[in-house]
Amino acid sequence: MHGMRYVYEWLFPAVWVAYLLYWQIAARGAKANERIESVGSRIFRTALLLAGVVLMSVAWIPGAWLYRRLLPMTVEMFWLGAAVTVAGLLFCVWARVTLGRNWSRSVTIKQGHELITRGPYGLVRHPIYTGLLTGFAGTAIALGQVRGVVALVLIFASLWYKLQLEEKWMRGQFGEVYASYVRHTKALVPWVL
């Protein structure tokens, strides 16, 4: 079990760092912004997201209840969490590749913005968020503590806030075409949510 802790300390950070490096590289060549969300909105949702990431990754936060174990610390749980994390991040990459030059970090409308409904966007309207939530859920499974669940709630709140803003802007940009897409494709979980 001691060796597993060592692997946990390095495997998950390595997976997330590799994902973030890909994301930075893939961000090059995105279309120019026509409209972008306010600074206040970006700060609010980024603060929620970072709070979740810190909770999940820092082991010295005050509050013993955060470290209460919800799942057993077993090799099986560790690898289940790793598999779910990698699957979620690969889903993000698929969505990012499909989105192409229409992607951005912030809520934006791009110049010449296109409505993408193929690939993972045929399964859910916000597959990058689905993949991120799945990735963080996998990390929380491997962690197996209350703080993983609290972190997941904060991350979900951040992404849900951003999703709501994006939905509003996409309805304004694409009108009935987007409304029809909404009627036929769930936001985050196929056939459910």
Image (cartoon, rainbow, N blue to C red):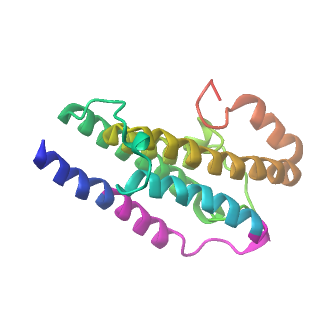
Q: Residue at x 68, y 32 (%)?
A: 185
Q: Residue at x 77, y 30 (%)?
A: 183
Does residue 97 appear in the picture of this structure?
Answer: yes
Q: Work out whether residue 31 or residue 78 is closer to the camera in this orientation and state it.
A: 78
Residue 109 lies, in percent from the top left, at 77, 63
Does 46 sit above or below residue 77? Answer: below
For the record, the magenta segment spans 15-39
Q: Residue at x 11, y 49 (%)?
A: 3
Q: Residue 28: say if magenta.
A: yes
Does residue 110 appear in the picture of this structure?
Answer: no
Total of numbered circles in the picture? 0
Q: Quadrant of the C terminus?
A: top right
Q: Work out whether residue 54 or residue 138 is closer to the camera in this orientation and state it.
A: 54
Q: Is residue 166 left or right of residue 145?
A: right
Residue 104 falls in image quadrant:
bottom right
Residue 125 lies, in percent from the top left, at 66, 41
Residue 115 lies, in percent from the top left, at 72, 51
Q: Residue 96: say if magenta.
A: no
